[in-house]
Image (cartoon, helix red, strand yellow):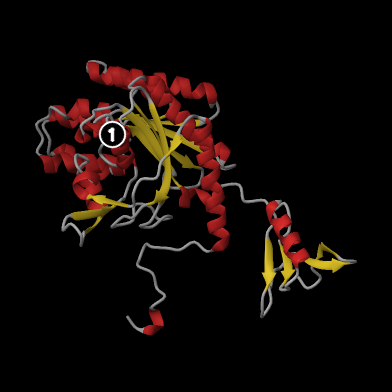
Amino acid sequence: MTTENRWLLPEGIDELLPERAAQLESLRRRLLDQCATWGYRYVIPPLVEFTDSLLVGLGADLDVVTCKFTDQMSGRMLGVRADITPQTARMDAHSLAENGVTRLCYAGSTLQSTPQSVVSGRAPIQLGAELYGSDCIEADAEVITLMLSMFEAAGVKRGLTLDIGHIGIYDALFSDAGLDADLESQIFDALQRKSTPDIERLASALPAEIATKLLTLSALHGSADVLGEARTVLGNEPVVVAALDELEAALNQVQRSYPDVDVYIDLTELRGFRYHTGLVFAVYLEGRGSAIAKGGRYDNIGAVFGRDRPATGFAIDLKALVDDAKPIEMVDLPVIAPQLDDPTLREAIAALRSAGRVVVIDVPPGVALPDAERLVEREGQWVTERDTAS
């Protein structure tokens, strides 16, 4: 690398400059405070873990996007987290090991080998909440309602759409189909991408009964009427009916708090990592092509850590959300203070900072602020007045 381009960052890796960083930090604090009011306790999982802990039992898709390297101290393979949810599951199962329901929340940077979002590139900042220890539909409804409340707390004005489905429907239709792993992976990926040509191509190579299930499932998305259609065409599958009942019950509870939220039923909603086992959901903002938040039920993760616990949760991409969040409102102008060895000046600066004011010391070659006040001495007192130079 030449000296001319040493400032370049790796593709998909970005930096946040002061204004945007301040907006994102304000958003992070607001959303974590919102989680706290719901009883979710804040945890800070490590940035890296041994891969046999970070990735065990979570499927190939998370493995592929995880950046790995050898630990020089132990010789074992380490992974930089690409998703924080599995880490909180480990903390719940092993580090905390509490009885009853455990509610946790978190916020932190992640790293992905390839970008999963155009907005966040390879380094999303993920904030989420997880509920462990309850498999009831009320737990799913709570998590979805909390997720929607986050957008309200963020001051988002753009319209929201709740995209909701149930992974159990896909599993019920295809788990006993006897498909080889490669073909099943192609079907899963085609449904994830909503690729009609690929779905039709795959269906043409499948036995008639399985092809019919695939084509039927791929068409089941749209308004709330989809639930009735699904009961009509898939009503002879008891597991599917149970999944539809769960989806409808959760949605009814969510809509008591958010009756006006737009809902899109998507029984092929398979986005995200393949550790989900039940309800899956996402939030889209009007005019944005990719999901801002994703979540779902993932009851099997804790088993690999020795404690099989039901779990449900969501994660929000803060970088994708920050531009739609309500901006920081500066109540007071920053204050410029002169560089003087004066005890009364130091007391005045300390008092202002204790009151929450921003005070900047005017060191050479001088402070340039577009809009500020200045500390000046008037009759032995240090007072603030509008900076005429700004």
Q: Residue at x 22, y 35 (%)?
A: 305
State the image coordinates of residue 262 (x, y, percent, origin top left): 50, 32
Residue at mark 1: 276
Name the quadrant containing residue 174.
top left
Badge 1 crowding class, 10 Å Cα cut-off, few under 14, some 14 to 19, many 20 or more, is many
Residue furthest out toward the front: 343
Q: Is residue 182 left or right of residue 255?
A: left
State the image coordinates of residue 284 (x, y, percent, origin top left): 46, 41
State the image coordinates of residue 336 (x, y, percent, origin top left): 73, 67
Foreground pick, 293 / 351 = 351
Number of labels in the image equals 1
Q: Residue at x 28, y 33 (%)?
A: 93
Foreground pick, 142 / 309 = 309
State the image coordinates of residue 297 (x, y, percent, origin top left): 32, 30
Disc 1 residue type?
A: His
Quadrant, the C terminus = bottom right
